[in-house]
Image (spheres, rainbow, N blue to C red):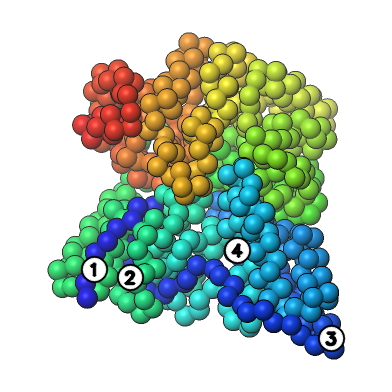
Amino acid sequence: MRLAFSGHGASRGLALGRARVRRPHALEIAEQRVPAARVKEEAARLHEALEATRAEMRALREKLQGALSKEAIEFIDLHALLLDDPELVQALDALIHQERYSAGYALRVQRDRLAAVFQSMDDAYLRARLDDLDHIIGRVNAHLHRHDPLPRGTAGEVLVCDNVAPSELAQLQAQGVVAIVSAAGSPLSHTAILARSLHMPLVVGAAEVLTRINDGDVVMVDGESGQLVLDPDATDLRRYRELEQRDQRERRDLERLRSKPTRTRDGVDIALYANAESREDVARAHAVGAAGVGLYRTEFLFLQDRDTPDEEEQFLAYRDAVLAMGGRPVTFRTLDLGADKADRAGLALANEDNPALGVRGVRLSLLYDVVFDTQLRAIVRASAYGPVRVLVPMVSCREEVLIVRRRLRRAVAAVRRRGVAVQVPPLGAMIEVPAAAIGVHGLADAVDFLSVGTNDLVQYLLAVDRNNDALGDLYSPLHPGVLRLIAHVLRAGNEHGVPVAVCGEMAGDPRLAPLRLALGLREFSLHPAGLLELRRAIRDCDLARLQARAPHLLQARDRRGIERWLEAS
């Protein structure tokens, strides 16, 4: 019987397929004890399952390298680290050897113990790690019982689930899953961001799906509107084909924009840069006509191996990125690690009470002098092959920028002593910390450019974790306070003659192009996959008209007022 319901569109695209329902993880395993003679065998069975899960995570990591943004690799590494956590492994051994529990029941008992600890924590970020625990426990349990943790034979199917981890997306797509519908989740989560980069239709927050949809049901998914239709009728199917044809026309139209300028209707050129972290990303940026790389994430090298990458390894990666852009500038963001990111080199501090407010970004770089100086020399050496800029993350005060500038000059001097003719690259600061945005005048005369990192700035300013489903409605770049603070940063940049770019999800959303232009932004850095859509949106804008309406935008009292302004644009 036909049934229509809705969630929140998180990644646009259309899909029609059979449903594959994955129920929320729950270890419904009855208490079971094993004879004393079987204890060693049961412990060995558990460790085989743990090792099989480790091998699975390693294989998945290798497959994803360069295919996704760094967030996917970080989640995989975080899950791998959980497998080696003494709180998990030693406790499981104790439950088997001392209580003579079966491996499956020991897994359930320890999961429940750790879940109680996570749920009692005051910090929302740490409470959210329960999802990671359940994800990895589910994989171990699957290997323990010799069945696949992810469904096989899913080609042409729509995965219906409670939630999905970012690390699963590419694997699901490779298996032929055509769309994902989840009961929980947020359009601004890591999963949603990665789904958009993969062009995987995703609908989140569709609370009814797990009670209304069964395996094998035919489901029609609209990832833009969030609309779902169970058992679509002839009218629905006709509409689906019409929307599909519209999307195909749009894709053809976008392809024609590859060689077109990013210019408003009234003739103002806008610079579109690409975010990147690999050669594949840089190649995509070049192919879609990006003005350069506005944010190259250097930490991906530190997320691959147990050892910190040396200068030569970093230099070769940076040099190749510069050469690939063929004379267009590449902005290297210095190491952006922290305790919330599972770096394999062991630089991030463990057990920080609040990693989001901890030793991360430039704070971590200044803590490790040798590591930071090595990275700066590698970037400076790469600058001999083309235009390079250096961008410092998580800046909170002027003193940090001045220290980095001294260290950068020292790196240039060291490279020159080797006989390489290089200049001091332009130095920029990321505006992610509210204090840096408010006190931007103290930074603007100490840097050559600024880049507003909207993802972190919004969540710090609003005190809302964008991955917390319960707070999804509160996290929004359309908060009046966010827009006024960005406008303040832009005014300071203009006064000091310092260009200001914007990166993050706010930069890449084509629906927000009129708003960003009205505020005065002229440089954007976004994932290459979204660059052509943003170029089209900008080419449809009349900048003079938007600037005339800018005062009304900044006078809006609430989110709805800003949305009305956008609707009238």
- Classify 158 as above or below 558: below
- The amino acid at mark 1 is Leu
State the image coordinates of residue 385 (x, y, percent, origin top left): 65, 37
| Residue drawn at the location 75% of the way across and 78% of the way down | 101
How many marks the image carries: the answer is 4
C-alpha separation, residue under disc 3 versus residue under disc 1: 54 Å
Callout 2 secondary element = helix
Secondary structure at badge 3 equals: helix
Residue under label 2, please give it.
Answer: 212
Q: Residues within 10 Å of mark 2 (few under 14, many from 20)?
A: few
Q: Is residue 501 left or right of residue 16?
A: right
First in sequence, mark 4 or 1: give its number. 1
Q: Secondary structure at mark 1?
A: strand
- Residue placed under numbered mark 4 in the picture: 134
Left-right relation of 134 to 243: right
Q: Earlier in the sequence, mark 4 or mark 2?
A: 4
Quarter the N terminus occupies: bottom left
Query: Camera-side residue: 520 or 191?
Result: 191
In depth, the one of 321 and 520 nearer the eye is 520
Dot 1 corresponds to which residue? 3
Q: Residues within 10 Å of mark 4 (few under 14, many from 20)?
A: some
| Percent coordinates x, y for residue 66 in the rendering | 59, 56
User: Which residue does the numbered mark 3 point to in the structure image?
Assistant: 36
In the rendered view, does 401 fall on the left or right side of 47? left
Q: Name the quarter where the C terminus is drawn.
A: top left
Asked whether the viewer can see residue 1, the reply is yes
Under tag 4, what secondary structure? helix
Could you tell me how far apart the alpha carbons at marks 3 and 4 are, in whole angstroms? 29 Å
* Gap between marks 4 and 1 measured at Cα: 31 Å
